[in-house]
Amino acid sequence: MKLLKPGLHLKRWLGVLLLGMVVVSLGIAYALTEVYRGGTFPVWVQAVTLQFLPLLVRSAIFLLVGGVLCALGLRGLYRSLEEGLPTPGNGHQSLLERIYDYRQRQGGPRIVCIGGGTGMPTVLRGLKSYSANITAIVTVGDDGGSSGRLRREHGILPPGDFRNNIVALAQVEPLMARLFQYRFGEGSPLGGHSFGNLFVLAMCGITGNFEQALRETSRVLAVQGTILPSTLQDVQICADFIDGSHVCGESQIPEVGRRIERVRLEPDHPAAQPEAVRAILEADLVVLGPGSLYTSVVPNLLVEGVAKALIQSDAVKVYVCNVATQAGETDGYDVKAHVDALVRHLPGRVNPLDVVLAPRHPDGAVSPDTEVELVYGAPLSDVTGPRILLEDVVRDDLALRHDPDKLGAALMRIYEEQRRVARVPNGAVRAAL
């Protein structure tokens, strides 16, 4: 019986309904008893109520017929609800399966993902099957393409990265997701713009501010979670290179082609979005990356209050290392170099990470003439520092990209393992490791 499946939160209400039916039946029985004692029934009433049969036989017949009618009614109600309620993104689930999944996700861990608009949507797609309590904290430094044009011409925060993450968490039909990602062709005033970016721009005009525009856009697309900017200030990402030169502009940094020493924001130390800081402090799991290390992940940590909240949070903290290096940013980097660069930008160079999740590459994953290199690392387990775990989290058909399902499952395994470790005494942990 699917109705009796744990976690649906239906059995208690079915019990209340059954109890109510029993109480109503008792009331009717008492009333009919008084009527029966006080007079005689018309012939047709006696026929309908089967007065010509023994009392126990009548009771059994009415209980059987009533039970059948209740079952038919509940079945018809269930089918009507199932037909009347669409199933966004998955038309193969029954109503009870949808209710069960919804309840499971509502009771899922509080997850915060920090990154940009390319790598983080993959994480969100993988995690939204496990929890509805997801907050995506998105960098606001994008200055290229459609986002850069809208930023310069209309004075809004760059919407592109937010659009990608909204679509990743949306519970809508695939056609709606494709619509939001649709990009107009060149040769027209709208050339290069995506429909989703223009939608967010229009929503800014209707609601009056970018924050409210994100909330309303998320509501329209039935987003399962919250999308937040790390800061509401208009900032630029600047990079200082090891040769002493520097450049400003997220889209310009990879073009220079020099080794990056560190990145910074202008203006320096912008104020964090308060809800983003609160989400980090209250989180059960914080995921950084994947994505452009210097232009998507690190800029969020340069916002005043975000890095401090990350260090103070009791959440399980995981850095998802990129599958491959990024030309102009992380050429020649291995897993350790990625982590070192991340920590280099944190206050006091404190490493708050519990686990670094790195991809395990099969032999021959990419051809020798590929422009980028795969990121490699050695598995490491250290009580005093983050564990480096190598997992199969890449797509079977494209070895340069994370697989959302594999990545989501790996992150949830790490979360559960870290929770178990946290409940074990320190001596037992050291013995196990």
Image: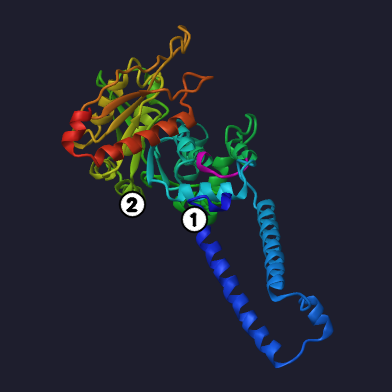
- The single residue placed furthest to the bottom in the displayed view is 38
Which image quarter holds the C terminus? top left
Element under label 2?
A: helix
The image shows residue 240 at horizontal and vertical percentages of: 28, 26
The image shows residue 58 at horizontal and vertical percentages of: 72, 72
Residue drawn at the location 45% of the way across and 41% of the way down: 130
Q: State yes or no: residue 156 in magenta.
A: no
Which quarter of the picture shows residue 371?
A: top left
Residue drawn at the location 60% of the way across and 71% of the way down: 21
Main SS of residues in magenta: loop
- The single residue placed furthest to the front in the displayed view is 54
Q: Can residue 262 be seen in this view?
A: no
- The single residue placed furthest to the right in the displayed view is 43
The image shows residue 257 at horizontal and vertical percentages of: 36, 17
Q: Give the labeled residue for mark 2.
A: 274
Element under label 1?
A: loop
What span is in magenta?
168-173
Q: Give the labeled residue for mark 1.
A: 208
Which quarter of the picture shows residue 318?
A: top left
Q: Can residue 42 be seen in this view?
A: yes
361 lies left or right of 154: left
Position of 339 relative to 157 (above/below):
above
Q: What residue type is labelled 1?
A: Gly
